[in-house]
Image (tube, rainbow, N blue to C red):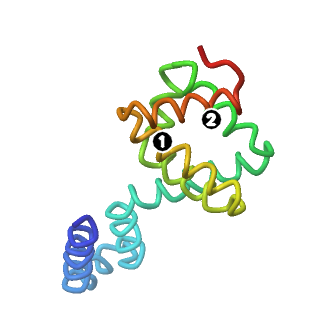
Amino acid sequence: MDIVFRGLHIAIVLGLWWFLRDDIDALGVSSNLVLIIALVAVLYKAIYEDLLELFLYFLIILTGGGFLRWMCAGYQSGTGFRQWVMTSHLMSGVIGVMVNVVESTCRAKYEEIMDLYLESNDPDKEVRLKAVLETYMGDSS
């Protein structure tokens, strides 16, 4: 739906620019510059999100994954800001990409743990999840 609305806004900007470009040039302002500014205004949110996502990937690579570990530790400890960031749409996309990069044996274990977590209201799955967590993290109680 967002693509449709954004496409509609771009079409309106292009249409207005097409009809008014000679008048804009007559004012002494470059009509191409006005078009570029109008398109950036329409696409600002998408451009901002893409740049922020690239920055996050760069930060993760630059720190050798330290930034992601720091964020995850804050999420697990209950730190408000890091919990909020980790549950944001942008960070969940970054984590999804990171999970897809992991080799298949580790990914299979991750998916098993996530499946157990998502179905942890079942007593058998809860017991299995606790056993897996104790294996990887030590005593979780």
Q: Is residue 57 left or right of residue 11?
A: right
- Neighbourhood count class around disc 2 (C-alpha, 10 Å): few under 14, some 14–19, many 20 upward: some
Numbered disc 2: secondary structure: helix
Name the residue beneath numbered marker 1. Answer: 116
Q: Position of residue 139 (x, y in %)?
A: 67, 18
**Label at residue 137:** none
Q: Residue furthest front?
A: 124
The answer to whether the residue labelled 2 contacts the one labelled 1, judged by CB atoms less than 8 Å apart, is: yes
- Neighbourhood count class around disc 1 (C-alpha, 10 Å): few under 14, some 14–19, many 20 upward: many
Quadrant where the C terminus is found in the figure: top right
Name the residue beneath numbered marker 2. Answer: 132
15 and 100: which is toward the camera? 100
Q: Is residue 118 left or right of residue 102?
A: left
| Amino acid type at image mark 2 | Val
Cα–Cα span, label 2 and label 1: 9 Å
95 and 133: which is toward the camera? 133
Q: Residue furthest top?
A: 141
Residue shown at 62%/19% (left/top)?
A: 140
Q: Position of residue 49 (x, y in %)?
A: 47, 54
* Quadrant in the rendering for residue 138: top right
Q: Is residue 76 above or below residue 95?
A: above
Residue shown at 54%/55% (left/top)?
A: 96
* Quadrant in the rendering for residue 39: bottom left
Q: Is residue 78 above or below residue 67?
A: above
| Amino acid type at image mark 1 | Leu
Upstream in sequence: badge 2 or badge 1: 1
Q: Position of residue 127 (x, y in %)?
A: 50, 29
